[in-house]
Image (cartoon, rainbow, N blue to C red):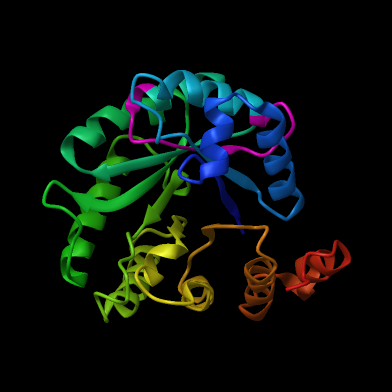
């Protein structure tokens, strides 16, 4: 199970302020806390900075985080120049690029970076026509994009498919269709990873944590093995370990028991 920590993101005011001020200590404490809470990878993003400042800021952020952790990083940016600068200084294992898509220009910009740095990549279910609004269109986009990646030499285990979940407030069938899509992608492309940010599902609704946590458990049952979550949320963290145990993905509940001994099940 891959747990991608989501908290080092400049959309969060405290993180954005720390990046602008180059407050390394604050960010390093955050990184260490997430790893101690069970994160096996950290998403790093400073995309709220002006485009001309983002590459240097992302480079500094990655170097700062890597100075105190050993987990690989999910390098998250819409800016290919920032991705390139971040990848050039990544040292802890295999980096994960967030993201590529079926959009022609984005695919052309990001694929060379995937190959140059032997990186894994998040593949967003979107193409030049936008986010698919039906299951059939999603399958069409998914199959073409993943096939194109495979044809270009990207190994299936280096692809992290993101179905781009919509809010259940505006699309009542989105969860059912997304879970069906997860089943389809794992059947068509054995060995592929599935990732997803949980918060989209609850956008616009009250008490969002209940929807986010419920979707986490459902999605894990349908193959999601690399959720982007807040590992410092004790309930979310405990649900990951418990669900893996119940789905027979934790032999003899060894990871669940280890997590208990480490104090990671206090949710």
For this view, does 11 lie left or right of residue 125?
A: right
For this view, does 243 lie left or right of residue 114?
A: right
Taking depth in this image into account, of 113 and 13 the one nearest to the observer is 13
Q: Is residue 71 one of those drawn in magenta?
A: yes
Magenta segment boundaries in residue numbering: 65-81
For this view, does 83 lie left or right of residue 235?
A: left
In the picture, which quadrant includes the C terminus? bottom right
User: Does the image show residue 74?
Assistant: no
Percent across and percent down for residue 114 are 40, 31
Taking depth in this image into account, of 128 and 79 the one nearest to the observer is 79
Percent across and percent down for residue 152 are 30, 35
The residue shown at (68%, 76%) is 242
Percent across and percent down for residue 22 are 60, 24
Q: Is residue 17 above or below residue 59?
A: below
In the picture, which quadrant includes the N terminus? bottom right
Q: Is residue 81 above or below residue 124?
A: above
Q: Is residue 10 above or below residue 245?
A: above
**Residue 194 image-quadrant placement:** bottom left
The residue shown at (71%, 55%) is 38
């Amino acid at each position: 199970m891959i747990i991608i920590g989501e908290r080092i993101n400049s959309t969060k005011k405290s993180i954005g302020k720390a990046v602008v001020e180059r407050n390394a200590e604050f960010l390093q404490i955050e990184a260490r806390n997430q790893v101690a809470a069970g994160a096996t990878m950290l998403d790093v993003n400073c995309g709220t900075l002006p485009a001309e400042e983002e590459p240097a800021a992302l480079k500094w952020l990655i170097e700062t985080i890597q100075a105190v952790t050993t987990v690989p990083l999910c390098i998250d940016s819409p800016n290919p120049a920032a991705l390139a600068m971040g990848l050039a200084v990544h040292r802890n294992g295999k980096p994960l690029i967030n993201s590529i898509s079926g959009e022609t220009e984005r695919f052309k910009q990001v694929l060379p970076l995937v190959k140059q740095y032997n990186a894994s990549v998040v593949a967003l279910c979107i193409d030049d026509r936008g986010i698919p609004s039906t299951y059939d269109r999603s399958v069409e986009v998914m199959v073409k994009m993943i096939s194109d990646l495979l044809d270009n030499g990207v190994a299936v285990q280096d692809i992290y498919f993101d179905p781009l979940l919509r809010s259940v407030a505006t699309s009542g069938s989105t969860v059912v269709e997304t879970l069906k899509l997860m089943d389809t992608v794992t059947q068509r492309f054995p060995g592929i990873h599935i990732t997803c940010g949980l918060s989209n599902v609850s956008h616009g609704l009250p008490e969002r944590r209940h929807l986010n946590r419920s979707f986490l458990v459902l999605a894990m049952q349908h193959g999601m093995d690399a959720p982007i979550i807040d590992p410092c949320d004790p309930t979310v963290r405990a649900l990951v370990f418990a669900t893996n145990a119940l789905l027979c993905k934790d032999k003899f509940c060894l990871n669940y028991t280890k997590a208990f001994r480490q104090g990671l099940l206090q949710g």
